[in-house]
Amino acid sequence: MLSMAGIFKAYDVRGVVPEELNEEHAYAIGYFFPQILEAEDTAKVKAVVLSRDMRQTSPGLASACEKGLRTAGFAVWDIGLATTPMNYFAVGFLGASGGIQVTASHNPARYNGFKFSRREAIPVSSETGIGKLEELVRTQKPPEPNPQGPYQIREIWQAYEAHVLRFLRVREPRLKVAVDVANGMATLYEPLFSQLNIELVPLFFGLDGTFPNHEANPLKEENLRFLQEAVVAQGCDLGVAFDGDADRAMMVDEKGKVVGADLLTALLAKAILARFPGASIVYDVRSSWATREAIEAAGGVPVRERVGHSFMKATMRKLQSPFGGELAGHFYYRENFYADSAIITMIEVLNLLRQEGKPLSELVKPLDRYARTGEVNFHVANKEEVITALAEKFGHGQVDFLDGITVEFADWWFNVRPSNTEPLLRLVMEARDPGLLSERRKDVEAVIRQVGREN
């Protein structure tokens, strides 16, 4: 039986190669994944879209996974090097049973992993298949490789390019945009950038899975420094930072200031509601009050949801919501199989800037009216005890347990939730002024530190 080493996560499989994750794991994952799909899939097409990122270990892992899929009798439609959003699109566009993207997203070079979806790009999470997949890989030994299923190389770039460009609704005026792809998969989008009527200022283009310039994680401030400097030095209208597999993006305004993804959700929601009046817009529990208020002001229905793409997408499908956004830089579109896409988000921001005719900083300013902490992490072993203690201490507020604990008062609120991917509690807090935020933060953190046992 294979050693798991904690590689099966809430939304994917991820680990250090080869110490934690290797080609033997990849073969077993490929062999058993069809059982996850067949549990719900009644389609006659038994095919999985397979693609990979530019990491040095990705070809070997993809090849082993392919052998596993085909040994299980499934067809493999190989789209080669691709972003994760391209994999999602291919699953929906080609009518596949599911998809596997070999990637470790924003993690450092020594990591790799797998992201999974089923038909129509519906995500597979721990609750909807990854847990079962882990059990199969852990307890059963797959047969020796004997590929029976067919193998095809499928070309989807032209279809994907046409799909993405349909989101470009406003082409004038020409804007100057700095784009940092961090040597990641968004490098593939260079032909797309040339069709957006922008003057491109490229940063760190060229596929390189060693990430020689900086880590491909735009949530870390130090990784945005190059983009911020380029925007100011080059006089750009916008800066865009993609993560390693190009499903997330963070935006920088013309002054070099990072725009919070929750505020960007609010801005884009207003524009999207103009096209879909009265629709539901989904946002995660960490988002600013300003997000909810902007959706309501634009005539939409704000819907809070748990953090995580499987929850966001499921709620959007249920409500037929045209758009949703998460604080981590994931933005979801009904017209994109409800999947996240950083390039579509970039295009929607270009549409907004052109339509409004104002700098991004001016558009964001009215929304940036509350004092916020951002996400603050705490290493604690007894997460549930801490959440119970917070509920007791702040029970006089409006309390809910949608994702961890959220407590809301008239002039401040906080959320503390266990991370889905790391052994952490994450705190997000917001207040009507910085002084109040500072005081209430001390109160909340005191409970966490008094009750929490260090992990």
Image (cartoon, rainbow, N blue to C red):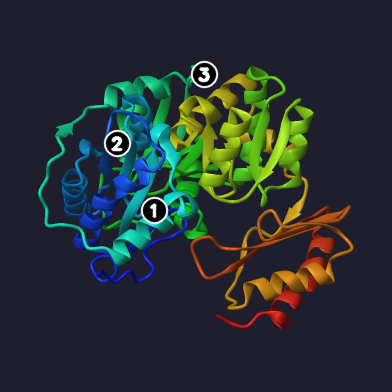
Above or below, 4 relative to 80: below
Q: Where is residue 181 in the image (x, y as percent from the top left)?
A: 37, 44
Q: Nearer the viewer, residue 73 or 455?
A: 73
Q: Position of residue 26 (x, y in %)?
A: 24, 56
| SS of the residue under disc 2 | helix
| SS of the residue under disc 3 | loop
| SS of the residue under disc 1 | loop
Sequence order check, earlier mark of 3 and 1: 3
Verify CB contact (< 8 Å) between mark 3 and mark 1.
no
Residue at the image position 24 percent from the left and 61 percent from the top: 25
Depth-wise, is mark 3 or mark 1 nearer the camera?
Answer: 1
Amino acid at the residue labelled 2: Leu
Above or below, 333 relative to 99: above
From the image, tell me which residue sits under label 2.
188
Verify CB contact (< 8 Å) between mark 3 and mark 2.
no
> Seen in the image, is 104 located left or right of residue 31?
right
Residue at the image position 49 percent from the left and 40 percent from the top: 239
> Seen in the image, is 149 located left or right of residue 424?
left
Residue at the image position 30 percent from the left and 43 percent from the top: 205
From the image, tell me which residue sits under label 1.
216
Tell me, yes or no, if residue 245 can be seen here. Answer: no
Depth-wise, is mark 3 or mark 2 nearer the camera?
Answer: 2
Sequence order check, earlier mark of 3 and 2: 3
Amino acid at the residue labelled 1: Ala
Above or below, 5 relative to 355: below
For residue 173, which numbered disc appears in the image?
3
User: What is the number of callouts on the image?
Assistant: 3
For the C terminus, the quadrant is bottom right
Mark 1 nearby-residue class (10 Å; few <14, some 14–19, many ≥20): many
Verify CB contact (< 8 Å) between mark 1 and mark 2.
no
Q: Position of residue 154 (x, y in %)?
A: 21, 29
